[in-house]
Image (cartoon, grey):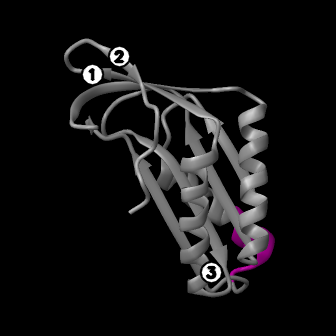
Amino acid sequence: MKIRVQSEPLSPWGLLADYEAQLISSHGSGKYGASAVFVGSMRDLNEGDAVQGMYLEHYPGMTEKVLQGMAEAISREWNLIDLLLAHRVGDLHPGEPIVLVAVWSAHRKAAFEACRALMETLKSQAPFWKREHLTDGSQRWVEKNTAGY
């Protein structure tokens, strides 16, 4: 299991390829029958307003600990073989990847359900704070996350 919070640009597909190679090396190629991946990117529109950027804050140390706890709980609940969670912080622009959630399990149902459960838990409970920069020059703190769809 790997949890990563980073300020540098997130390259989700490169991270995924590297981690999966490590996973196969350590667990063997036949241990899992399914994987599910979610990549979330920054939108240029929120609450009806055009957004040109965002600053995503976190509390180093605490955030990683909370994410680790979430990941461990989801992993136990769905009997996962492994899990990768990477999240951006700092300055972001529309179109840039913010989050990568990847899970590996014996069966597809567990992979799909665990991936979604981890993403929904992350969106509702992770200690991140978003300050949007709107195209009209104003800024605002995001008070709530969008509902899971």
Tell me the crowding category of disc 3: few under 14, some 14 to 19, or many 20 or more residues within 10 angstroms, Cα based: many
- Residue at horizontal 53%, vertical 71%? 36
User: Alpha-carbon distance for marks 2 and 1?
Assistant: 6 Å
> Sequence-wise, which precedes: disc 1 or disc 3?
3
Q: Is residue 58 magenta?
A: no
Query: Residue 10, percent across and down?
Result: 50, 40
Residues at circles 2 and 1 in contact by the CB criterion of under 8 Å: yes
Element at badge 1? Answer: strand
Question: Which label's residue is closer to the chain start, 2 or 1?
Answer: 1
> Which residue occupies the extreme top position in the image?
137
Residue 3 drawn above or below residue 54: below
Which residue in the protein does label 1 denote? 134
On the image, the x and y values in percent for residue 106 come to: 68, 85
Residue 110, labelled with which disc? 3
Q: Give the range drawn in magenta.
A: 22-29
At label 3, the amino acid type is Ala
> Is residue 26 covered in magenta?
yes
Disc number at residue 139?
A: 2
